[in-house]
Each structure stands twice: as structure tokens, then as C-alpha cells.
Image (cartoon, helix red, strand yellow):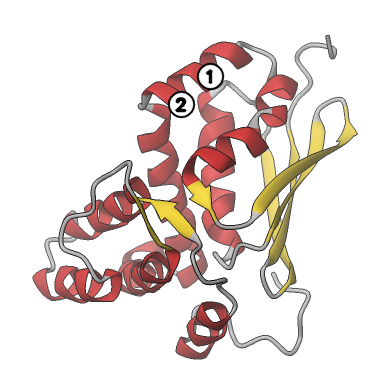
Amino acid sequence: MTSNPDAAELGSPADLALRLKLIPLGDTVRGYFFHCALEQIRLLRDEEALRRCREASGMESPTRFFKYPIHGFVRLLYEAAWALTDSAGSFEEAMRQLGRHVATEFLGSPVGKTMLLLAGDNLQRLADSLPMVYRTGWGHGVGEVAWTGFSSCRTSIHGNVIPFPYFEGIFLEVFQAAGATHLKVAGRQVGPADTEYELSWELRNLPR
């Protein structure tokens, strides 16, 4: 959902154009975000869709841990979501699917494995680590966490133009991988480049 009635329809070319205009010069994102989006399109076995996505990104084969201008990633993400919309059922669900896939890739990396190991069975600790983990991948915007209960929090991402369903998918995958039960994740747009996410899960242990 969106709280901005003047915004272009989510997933439209006009929406993409508006978001691209909001990106500060020099902002970056790690190459594995590019890699994961392209990997999902390869699974479609649609060469034309893959060609469009590569063209949108401006690169053929991004290196996972290099930093690249985020303009190319935003264009790639929209092109990939458009290609996946029919199979996913909607643009929003395609974005969630892309977010879940990049989270799965991240959780298999040394940084992701370390994050889960340090969190253990303490989901509060996992949530508190999100802003730090965010900085390992994004040179675009900042993340923060505010607690709303023992097993609920509000995660905010400021200055990032990526549509909220993408991060919904990331949070769903990460917390499910950590063993969260009765997990709920609800995102919303609160500004042109600002999003909020209400996360809650079944309480398993008291804060330490």
C-alpha cells in the first residue's frame, strides 16, 4: 500500500522515472543484488526478457561484491519485476519474490551465516542487527529499528527508492530462516524515498 496519493501507480514506467530522479549522485549497491535479479530472469528461459534486463542494468556480468551505481539496479529491478509479473500474479508479488531470492543468496554468504549465528534463537538480536547488515550491501539510504513490543518492531529505511515489497520479501525470508513463527511483515511507503515495515512474530524468549 502507499500513503502518498500523488505518487504514480506502483510498478508503472512513471513510477520508475520518479524514483530514478530521487537517487543522489554517487549512491551504490553491491553487485550481488544485480546478480540475484538476473538469476531469477534466467530461470524464466526467456532470452528476450534477459536481454532487456541486462540492457536496463547497463552491464553483462556484475561482480557480486563490487559496488555499482544504483540507477542501473533500479532499472534492472523494474524490468525483472515486469518480466515476472505474469508468473507471480502482480508487480508487488514479483518484487517480493525478487527480495526473497536476494535474501536467500545473502543468507548463504559468510556475512549472512554470521548474522544468523550471532542471533541464535534471539529474534530481537537479529532485528537489532538489521541496520548494520543493511550498510554492508547498500551505499544508498539508511536503516533503523524501533521496538514496539517484545516480539514486534518497526523497521524504517530512509533515502532508498526501492519499492517496499522488495524489502518485505527480504524480511520474510530472513526471519523465517531464523525460525520465526506466526511472522507478519507489512510495508508501506511513507515518503518519496522512505518506507516503513511493521514486523511481528510469536514470542519465544524474553529480551536478554
State the mark number for residue 99.
Answer: none
Estimate the x, y position of residue 159 in percent, counting from the top left: 66, 63
**How many C-alpha atoms fall within 10 Å of the one at disc 1: few (<14), some, or many (≥20)?**
many
Q: Which residue is mark 1?
A: 116
- Tell me if residue 97 can be seen: no
Q: Hey, what amino acid is under mark 1?
A: Leu
SS of the residue at dot 2? helix
Q: Quadrant of residue 203?
A: top right
On the image, the x and y values in percent for residue 142 come to 67, 51
Vertical order, 122 against 85 (above or below): above
How crowded pointer 2 is (Cα within 10 Å; few <14, some 14-19, many 20+) is rated as: some
The local secondary structure at tag 1 comes to helix
Residue at 57% in and 41% down: 134
The image quarter in which residue 64 lies: top left
Measure how far apart labels 1 and 2 are at the Cα level. Answer: 6 Å
* Foreground residue among 32 and 174: 32
**Residue at the spot x=68%, y=86% of the render?**
7
Q: Which residue is mark 2?
A: 112
Amino acid type at image mark 2: Gly
Total labels drawn: 2
At a point 86% along the width and 35% down the height, the residue shown is 147
- Asked if residue 139 is positioned above or below residue 2 in the image, the reply reads above
- Residue depicted at 45% across the width and 45% down the height: 100
